Amino acid sequence: MNKIEDKAMLRLENVNKYFYRYTQDEQWAVRNLNLRILEGQFVTVVGSNGAGKTTLLNLISGSYLPDSGKIMINGKEVTHLQAYRRAPYIGRVFQNTFQGTAPSLTIEENLALAYLKGKRKSFRPAINEEMRKFFQEKLSDIGLGLEKRLRERVGLLSGGQRQALALVMAIFGRPKILLLDEHTANLDPKTGEKIMELTNKLIYENNLTALMVTHNLQDALKFGDRTLMMDEGEIVLDLAGDERHKMTIEELLERFSELRHKKFAEDRALLSS
C-alpha cells in the first residue's frame, strides 16, 4: 500500500448503485465510482439534479448499500454495514433544517443526544451542570447567542440557528467524515453565507474530513480544497490545486458542457456501432 492510500480517510472502489433493480424502471444511480479522499480534505461536490451527488453521500453513510464495489473508512471496510453501525464514523447535516435535530426537545437536550451518541439509554438524557457548561462553551464559539437559550425548544429557532446547532451536533463525536447535503439550500443568501463561514471554520479548526454537496458553484470553488463534478452517476471532473484556484464559474460550466458533449458523442458512436 502506498503513502497516499495510507492517509486515505475514505475509499470507494468500483461502486455501483441501481434503483428499481431488475425492473423496467431500472436506473443506474452511481456507476463504477472510484474515489480517494485524504484525511483532513474538504471536498465540494457539484452536478445537475439526478447526477448522483446525494446518492454518493447516502452510500458513504450507509443509508444505501451498494450493489457492488467496496467502501472503506479510515482503513476499515464498511461496505455492508447499515447506517446505525456506521454512525460513530459519520457526522451529517441535511438540507432540511429540521432534519438532524429534534424540534420538540430543547437545545441542551439535542446537544446531549449528540454528545452521548452511541451511549444513551433514554430518550431524554440527564443533563448535569458540567455538561451544560460544556454546551455553553461550544455554542458561544459560533456567536449566535444560543448558549443563553439552552432550555428553549429547537422548533422555536430560525433556520440558520437550527443549521448552526446541527453543525455543532454533527461534530461532537469527532466523526471520521462530515457529510453536508446542500445544508444552506433552504436558507436566505445572507444566512447561507454565515452558515458557510461557520462550516468552514469548524471543519478546519477540528481538522475534519468533509464532503459538501452544493448547487452553489461559487461556494463549491471558494470553500474546501478539492471540487468534484458528477454527471449521470460518475465523477467527470476532479479539480484541486492551482487548476481549481484559477477556475471561474464560467470556465467550470464550459468544462462541464464540453464533457457532456463528448460523452453524448461517445454514446451515439457506441449505439451506431
Image (spheres, helix red, strand yellow):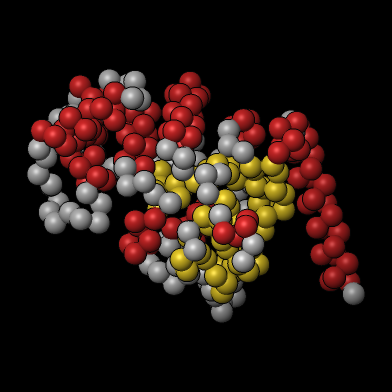
Residue 251 location (% of width, % of height): 78, 35
* Quadrant of residue 268 within the rendered picture: bottom right
Q: Nearer the viewer, residue 98 or 10?
A: 10
Looking at the image, can residue 19 be seen?
no
Q: Total of numbered circles in the picture? A: 0
Task: Provide residue 146's location: percent of width, then percent of height.
Answer: 26, 25
Residue 135: tell me if it is visible.
Answer: yes
In the image, 261 versus 193, the foreground residue is 193
Pinpoint residue 191: horizontal percent, then vertical percent.
44, 24
Q: In this rendering, is residue 117 above or below 109?
A: below
The residue lying toward the viewer, choosing from 259 and 177, is 177
Which residue lies most toward the bottom here?
22
Residue appearing at x 45%, y 24% in the figure: 194
Location of residue 42 by image quarter: top right
Query: What residue sits 13% from the left and 34% below the top?
Result: 130
> At x 24% / y 45%, what residue is drawn?
115
**Quarter that holds the C terminus:** bottom right
Residue 16 vs residue 58: left or right? Answer: right
Query: Is 153 on the left or on the right of 77, as rendered?
Result: left
- Horizontal and vertical percent for residue 124? 13, 47
Q: Is residue 223 above or below residue 239?
A: above
Q: In which quarter of the image is residue 169?
A: top left
For the N terminus, give its image quadrant. Answer: bottom right
Observer-nearest residue: 98 or 197?
A: 197
Say left or right for 229 vs 20: right
